[in-house]
Every structure is written in structure tokens, then in C-alpha cells.
Amino acid sequence: MASHLPDHFKCPISLEIMSDPVILSSGHTFDRPSIQRWLDEGHRTCPITKLPLPANPTLIPNHALRSLISTYTLLPPLHQIISQPETLISILKSSSSSSDSKIDSLRQLARLSKRDANFRRRLVDSGAVSAVLFCLDSSSGETKLQEKALSVLLNLSLDDDSKIGLVAEGAIDRVVAFLLREASSDCCALAATIITSLAVVEVNKGTIGAFPGAIEALVGILKDGKGRERKEAATALYALCCFGDNRKRAVDCGAVPILMRSVECGLERGVEVIGVLAKCKEGREHLESYGGCVKILVHVLRNGSSRGIQYALLALTSLCFHSKEMLLVTLQEGVLDICLGLVDDDNEKVRRNSSNLIRVLQSDGNHRMY
């Protein structure tokens, strides 16, 4: 066992794994039996620094190190974890396991499952999903445990073969719960990323979108979240809204004005969602009623990345095709000239979308009114 544990778990005197680590006044940690024997022999210097000690040295228990050693000694060597992950899974499932032992088990599972598809499949086959979900259910207030459990869940969702099974086992219920309650920013970002990963499978888009509170929670993070969690929420919302039925759900949750304000504040990823919401009638109606909508999209055309420009063009094309008023406003903003400059862009989708918008802007009455 000692061969695969860190050196600082070993007593400097006995060179054995410490069972009762204590801190000497010199700041160094020793196993209690070893340092006590040293002191009983009459030594009054630190075995490491050789500096003098008080006449009656105090031994302070190193609880943090003792807990860490206890956690590690529960874990098998790395090669055994890869071939037999059941030991770690059993730690996660046990209600008597400490939080530290669960966190360390999840840390190892997350590290090993991140890039090893075979290990991920072995985990799923060994019942890891229910174990990780159990950790999420019983981790109220324990941010570190929640983050590690969500990290493992994200890794397990990487394989298409597992995505439907994860939804069937109740992953969405737990993930949405994290988005709805006041979880940490990192937990919310991980939860949103899991939704994006699961939504790669078409059937999951509909299942997740119809789940009570799922889209509402993502819109809420876009409104009130910070940095990374807002970006991940926008990405997840885009993935879900690629499924037609979810667009109206997002609009009904007030997504359009929140997205437009986000784009104004520099969250370009919100333009991607606007681009797909503009495909539905409800989305276009809310965009038209948002003051300065065209100006915001034109700003993206002038200053955005290729992907942002691509979706701003898509949104403007949908708006102009269905509304003469929006077409006139778009022309007044000089979008035709902008598009003429984009038809030779290096990005094929930008070229195609700009050409489509040019055709609509030049159609002069052939657009559809609703």
C-alpha cells in the first residue's frame, strides 16, 4: 500500500505511513509513536531542523493529513482502479463514507474517465451512474463534492451510447435541480455543459426541453449568472433550440429580451440562440418588439467573430423575409453594403448567409407578410 501513496504521508523518522500524524512546534509532522519515542529518549531538538524544542513539547494532531491518509488508504492502486472500479463506486454508494473519501474517489474517476472511452463504458456497466447521482442527492451544501460528481457525470455523457441511458436514469432531474437552486457558479456551468452534451442526441433535445424547469433554468442563468455559467447556459439553450418545439418554450420563458441584453453586453454566444429563435414566429415577434434589435445585430455584423456574424445574418434573414418593416429598418442600417462585403469572406457559412440576406433585401416585395 505504501508504494503508491505520496511521500509526505510517511513519517520522517520511521519512513512508514503515519497512523496518527502530529505537528511539532518546528512545523514538521511526524507519526505520534515515532516522535514520542524520540522525545522519551531525551531529545529536545527537531529531528529534521535540529532546532531546539521547549522542555515539554506540544504535539498538535494534524487532522487534515490524517483524513487525507485515511481516504487514500481506502483506494486501490491505479491499475486496479482501471480494471476494477467497483471499489471506488462502492465508496460513493455507501452512506457511511466520509465526504473526503467520496471527493477523492470522484476525483480519481473524473481523471481516468476524461479521455478513456473504455474506462467510461466500464464505469457505466459497473453502476457508476446511480452512484454519482446518489452523491448529488446527498451532497447538499457540499460544493466540492457536487463539483466532482458533476465532473464525472459530464465525462460519462461524452459517449453517444450513454447519453440516452443517462437521461433515463434521472440525470436531467438532478442537473436541472442544480440550475434552479443557488448552486456555485462552477456547478451551474458544469450542469449546463452536461445538458449541452446530452442534447447532442436528437431524442434527448425533446426530452430535456419538455422537462419542467429545464429551459426556464437556463434562461434564468443567462439573466442572473456570471461569466462562464452564462456562456455555458447560452450554449445549452442553443443546443436545445435546434429542436423546433423548444424554440417556443424558450420564447415563452422570456429568452429573447434576456438574450438581446446579453449580446449588448458582449455575450456573442447569445447571437447563436437568437439565430435559431428567429426561425419561429413567436421568436420573430419578440425580436421585432425589442427596441434596437436590428442595431444590435448590425453591431455584431461589424465587430463580431465569424460565428457571430453567421448567426446575426441568419436572424436578419428570417426577420426581413417575414416582415417588410424589419426589411426597411435593415436597409436603413446599411446592411446591404455590409453583406456585399461579406460575400467574399473566408468562412463558407458567412458567404452563404450573406448571399441569402442579399437576395431577401433585394427581393423588393417578394417577402412574406404575416
Image (cartoon, rainbow, N blue to C red):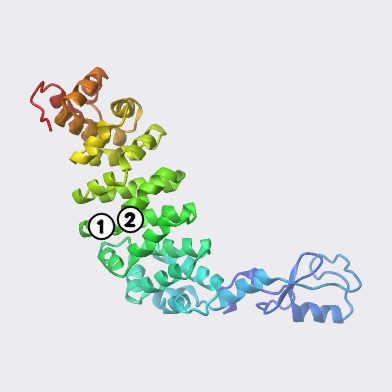
Which quadrant of the figure has residue 64?
A: bottom right
Choose between 357 and 181: the one closer to the eye: 181
Secondary structure type for disc 2: helix
Q: Quadrant of the N terminus?
A: bottom right
Is there a contact, CB below 8 Å, between mark 1 and mark 2?
Answer: yes
Q: Which residue is mark 2?
A: 214
Against 60, residue 354 (above or below) is above
Q: Which residue is mark 1?
A: 210
Counting from the top left corner in percent of width and height, residue 351 is at 20, 30
Q: Residue at x 43, y 69 (%)?
A: 137
Which quadrant of the figure has residue 7?
A: bottom right
Q: Specify whether 91 is left or right of 253.
A: right
Residues packed near mark 1 inside 10 Å, few (<14), some (14 to 19) or many (20 plus): some
List the single residue furthest toward the left.
366
Could one spot residue 156 in this view of the protein? no
Secondary structure type for disc 1: helix
Q: Residue at x 28, y 38 (%)?
A: 274
Q: Specify whether 66 is left or right of 366.
A: right
Choose between 121 and 60: the one closer to the eye: 60
Counting from the top left corner in percent of width and height, residue 336 is at 21, 20
Choose between 199 and 241: the one closer to the eye: 241
Three-letter code, disc 1: Ala
**How many numbered discs?**
2
